[in-house]
Image (cartoon, grey):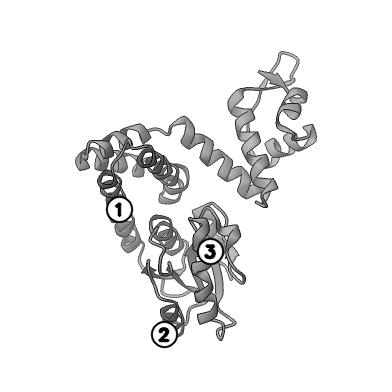
Amino acid sequence: MVTIKRAAELTGVPEHTLRAWERRYGLVSPGRTAAGYRLYDEAALARIRLMHSLVRAGWAPHQAAVESARRTQAESGLPGERELVAAAAAMDGDAAARVLDAQFARGSFETVVDEWLMPAMTGLGRAWASGEVSVAGEHLVSNLVMRRLAAAYEAAGQPASGRTILVGAPPGVDHELGLLAFATAARRAGTATVYLGSQLPAEAWHDAALKVGADAAVSSLYRRRDAARLRPVVEAVADLPSLELWVGGRHQHLAPPPFRPLGHSISEAAVRLATP
């Protein structure tokens, strides 16, 4: 445990900024001495360092705080995450389904998606990358998740009024979990969503936007190299100046203009787009 002065020295973040991050974003909850002085443990220092690096990379402080919490929680192991990874490694679909159902029963759709599902799927991806989980095991769990998200999407229903948003990914991009989770949260927030899935050709974005009278289009930038795949979409809808272009995902800050970043909270992004 170290004092705030030492924490500032170790992380490179000034003391007044540490206090502000604690007060405004709840980044850490330091312990206290009997005299009331702050004390920071290694987990707190790790979270501060991560937020500092994200802010220096161009993230807004609020978004960086959310992402820092998400990543450090994933690294420390979320409740049920190890069980999900073990089920994937054993190709045990029933066990994986039980873990998913138990977690989705713990809170609102938005809370579970932001605080558990997305970090847990990141953990599953790490397990695949390390060889702990096979490609088949990763696909097994991903498809179980997709089926639950699809059911939640249908259950949300299509609002009779409100803004209309296209949600999809261009050719070469096949990460759909975040997109479908967002589309579901957007419907629940009162937005009419048209979910078009992955591998959607650029000209199809234009045709769909005209057909449904879309106010906005949302895509995802999960990998750095996917930034180039968004450019044909920009060109295809250039004659639709009123169509807003938004992007989520880990590398959303690399998206070509006029794409705008949605931030790293699916629930907050859904509420933002629900309001003109």
How busy is the neighbourhood of tag 3: few (under 14 within 10 Å), some, or many (20 plus)? some
Residue sitting nearer the eye, 56 or 18 = 56
Quarter of the image for residue 82 reads top left
Of marks 3 and 2, which one's residue comes earlier in the chain? 2
Residue at image coords 40%, 69%:
171
Tell me the element at label 2: helix
Quarter of the image for residue 123 reads top left
Q: Amino acid at mark 2?
A: Lys
Residue at image coords 32%, 35%:
132
The residue tagged 1 is: 148
Residue at image coords 65%, 26%:
30
Of marks 1 and 2, which one's residue comes earlier in the chain? 1
What is the spatial separation of the Cα atoms under label 3 and label 2, in whole angstroms? 26 Å
Task: Residue 265 in the image: state x and y as whole percent.
Answer: 53, 52
Asked whether, in this view, residue 268 is left or right of residue 2, the answer is left
Tell which tag, 3 or 2, sits nearer the viewer.
3
Q: Amino acid at mark 1?
A: Arg
The residue tagged 2 is: 211
Residue 94 visible in the snapshot? yes
Residue sitting nearer the eye, 49 or 188 = 49
Residue sitting nearer the eye, 224 or 51 = 224
